[in-house]
Amino acid sequence: MTGFGAGDNGLLWCERGEVVDLSGLGDVFAQPTLNPIMAEGRTAWEEAIAAARAHDGPRVSKPEAHLPFEVADYVDFYSSLEHATNLGRMFRPDQEPLLPNWRWLPVAYHGRAGSVVVSGTDVARPRGQRKAPDEAEPAFGPSRRLDFELELGFVVGVPTELGEVVPVDAFADHVFGVVLVNDWSARDIQAWEYVPLGPNLGKSFQTSVSEWVTPLALLEEARVEAPPQDPPPLDHLAGGRDWGLDVALEVELNGEPLSRGNARTLYWTFPQQLAHATSNGARLRTGDLMASGTISGTEPGSEGSMIELFRGERFLEDGDEVVLRGRAVNGVELGEVRGRVVPPL
């Protein structure tokens, strides 16, 4: 893994399997989260990376996992054409799989920041209201269709004022780094509640992220051209197509590989997502987490969720452990996201 994390005494740096305690570098490195340094901007970020790599501080053999940043807000997008198409065909077999707005804007829902947890945290099977098509009325109980979602997310460093917008070409001025994300989903609860206002309790119970934030600057060599968009986006979303990220992704279930894909397939790029999120003047705060939505590819076995992989015939059982991994084409490894399903609390 390569990136910054949070330790017992301050910030940590992880690279090539070695973890270094950075707390001796000064006050900003002796903080419990990355938020203070993330707020300082690109020059400070570059200096922090250089200082971390040069620091001959104490090595930490088995650091306890901490949430690396204080999450201000959490937004989850729906930016994979393949994923959106797959679900559309499953849920609306007699209609066009994509809703009319999908190719015009990065669809998203606003999640719960307080439910974002660090890798290694168990996920308790959520309870909720659910109704199968053949049932006369809904019932309340544990989800029977618990799923994972393989996602890549970005973390905002530099905030904005209310009313300020962030154009696509200013993305790197505001975003500190990226994390892997597992947006756990209770498909039965989600299916019953999501019309007309979208996901709520089927998503809000838990979202897991890596304990390491990989600085955006370390992924420059992994930038590739994103897939073409048709129709061309409106002017405020035009551009940002050179921000596809060649990051190989893998899902492991109970120690066995289950799915392999790549983030470069995303239809809507991170700069477009950020531009859309601020296009109405909504304020950015240091620690905002914005996730891509499930990343799926065109090849069998590249789907980023169980509902796609098994066409709704299989979901997570209690005791199952899901591990997400990511590796950029330039060799930079993102921190893994691990979670084990346990019975309802």
Image (spheres, rainbow, N blue to C red):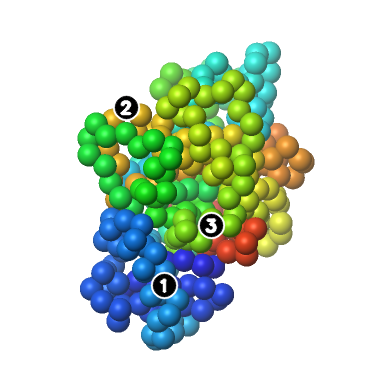
Distance from disc 2 to disc 3, alpha carbons, whole Å, reads: 29 Å
| Rendered image: mark on residue 50 | 1
Q: Residue at x 71, y 56 (%)?
A: 257
Q: Is residue 70 visible?
A: no
> Which amino acid is tagged 1?
Ala
> Which amino acid is tagged 3?
Leu
Which is more N-terminal, label 3 or label 1? 1
SS at mark 1 in the image: helix
Which residue in the protein does label 2 denote? Answer: 280
Name the residue furthest right.
300
Q: Is residue 225 visible?
A: yes
- Place of residue 312 in the rendered image (x, y in percent of width and height, measured from the top left): 67, 34
Which residue in the protein does label 3 denote? Answer: 219
Which is more N-terminal, label 1 or label 2? 1
- Place of residue 212 in the rendered image (x, y in percent of width and height, measured from the top left): 46, 63
SS at mark 2 in the image: loop
